[in-house]
Image (cartoon, grey):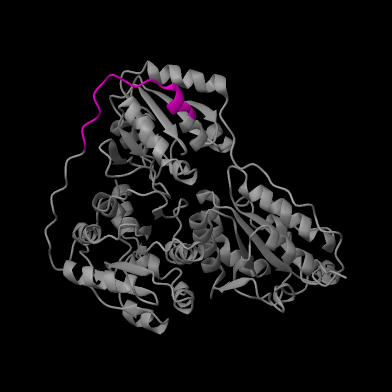
Amino acid sequence: MATVRDATYDVLRTLGMTTIFGNPGSTEEPFLRDFPADFHYVHALHEATAVAMADGYAQASGAPAHVNLHTAPGTGNGMGNLVTAWHNKTPLIVTAGQQTREMLLLEPRLTSRRAAELPQPYVKWGYEPVRAQDIPAALMRAYATAVQPPAGPVFLSLPMDDWAQPADPPPAQRSVATRFAPDPERLDEFVRVLTGSRNPALVFGPGVDRSGSWAEAVTLAERLAAPVWSAPAPERGVFPEDHPSFRGVLPFAIGPLAEALSGHDTILVIGAPVFRYYPYVPGEHLPAGARLLHVTDDPDEAARAPVGDSLLGDPGLTLVALVERVPRADRPAPPPRDRMTPPEVTAPLSADALFAALAEHWPADGVLVQESPSNLSALRRRLRLNRPASYFTMASGGLGYGLPAAIGVALAERDTGRGRPVVAVVGDGSFHYSVQALWTAARLSLPVVVIVPVNRQYAILKAFAALKETPGVPGLDLPGLDITAIATGYGCATEVVETPDQLAAALAAGLSADRPTVLPVPISTEVPSIL
């Protein structure tokens, strides 16, 4: 007779979810015993690392990922990156072990009290099945919930003695739609506004990349002869950054953002919240006289927008509909941005010089995963990406995501057969939040190159302290960190890079290696402006 464990693995096979990310614990061992040969267990050394790897894998593969955590403590360990997965709109199925049902009333060691509530509000659905036999069907429901828009993580708490119980007949195989079209009447209203606009601007967000709609975004921009901005603090790339219409990333504060859009009478935002702000810099949300139109597949985003008229719809389907309906404008196309002058090469390098060198030697099909907050403006200025699904970071603002996410992306590139090269840019502060991810990358022989700008400080916090006039904050310097020793200890190749020529050679070698490469780069300690 089939057990609940047998039936659950069959459901996972049906869903194509044969890769499991995790760090095994005692409450998970009954599920993991005699691990099936057709499954791949991606072993992380910490639950936060497992969640971020699964997030990167899901985003790069375009399919949900399964991450297995250890009851309440493991779920707690993974929560920071679970918050990021929620904001990234990443479909994850998170399962966690639970104590034996017969002892739950006693709340013994490793019981997860009110387990389904523990990860709230950062999961779309949390559940602990009432019966062991409900687990396979609960998994099917979890999948359907995770993939429907807005996609996101779900959570199942699974008692450890359920796996050996006899199973009910397997749940019916079924599928759910993951995209929905915009309301045609509301769409026609948006078309009328855009057609009559004197000087429209387009603001594209990560939803454009998630829906695979770069081509439609370019067509709409060219048809409207409108400049294109990226929404503030995007977790994905949104538009080819070498296109003449592209203007860069909007500032993520209220007053400066409105100032950047001054002169435009219509602002169309697609696939992003309105807007992602931090820090608080007061001002009007929009320039005087401007009207905002908002397209999102997330009802919560539409509800909390402080200004504008919202239309619910898949960003890609809505872009297709707009391209079909919007007539070609008779105004001239916006002029391209000025070319940037090459930065001065100093010792140590400035962030601009480092990233200018990286841009010069960037692999044609490269994927960038970044978590270097203080250097982000310089990175985005110098390295202009022009391919979809080429940029990933955390939407939450929480550190410890970038390094393991890059490893998840690299694994997805291997598993899908695309084999795109993956480069992570991770600040020396961020690097140590999830540094144990390097071990997994080395064990999997993934040729990820990790560039670590080393300024021996939390420069982003110093910048924020300067903006908010909060001097004397402790703990903002990071002396005594030996990145090369740590990388070597985890099994990585490593080399300190001090010049652009060194970077070119080390990058090429790392991308052709059979293990991860960590490249610490000493940079200037000058603290950049936060805005």
Q: How many marks?
A: 0
Residue 92 falls left or right of residue 109: left
Residue 36 visible:
yes
Q: Which residues are magenta?
A: 321-336
Residue 500 x/y as whole percent? 18, 66
Look at the picture and state if 454 lies above or below 442. Answer: above
Mostly what secondary structure, the magenta segment?
A: loop
Look at the picture and state if 366 lies above or below 531. Answer: below
Residue 420 x/y as whole percent? 40, 61
Residue 117 x/y as whole percent? 69, 55
Residue 7 part of the magenta segment = no
Residue 194 x/y as whole percent? 40, 21
Residue 329 part of the magenta segment = yes
Look at the picture and state if 397 lies above or below 319. Answer: below
Rendered residue at 61%/43% (across/down) = 178
Residue 334 falls left or right of residue 238: left
**Residue furthest front in the image:** 417
Residue 1 falls left or right of residue 49: right
Q: Nearer the viewer, residue 41 or 288?
A: 41
Q: In the rendered image, which quarter contains the C terminus?
A: top left
Residue 481 visible:
no
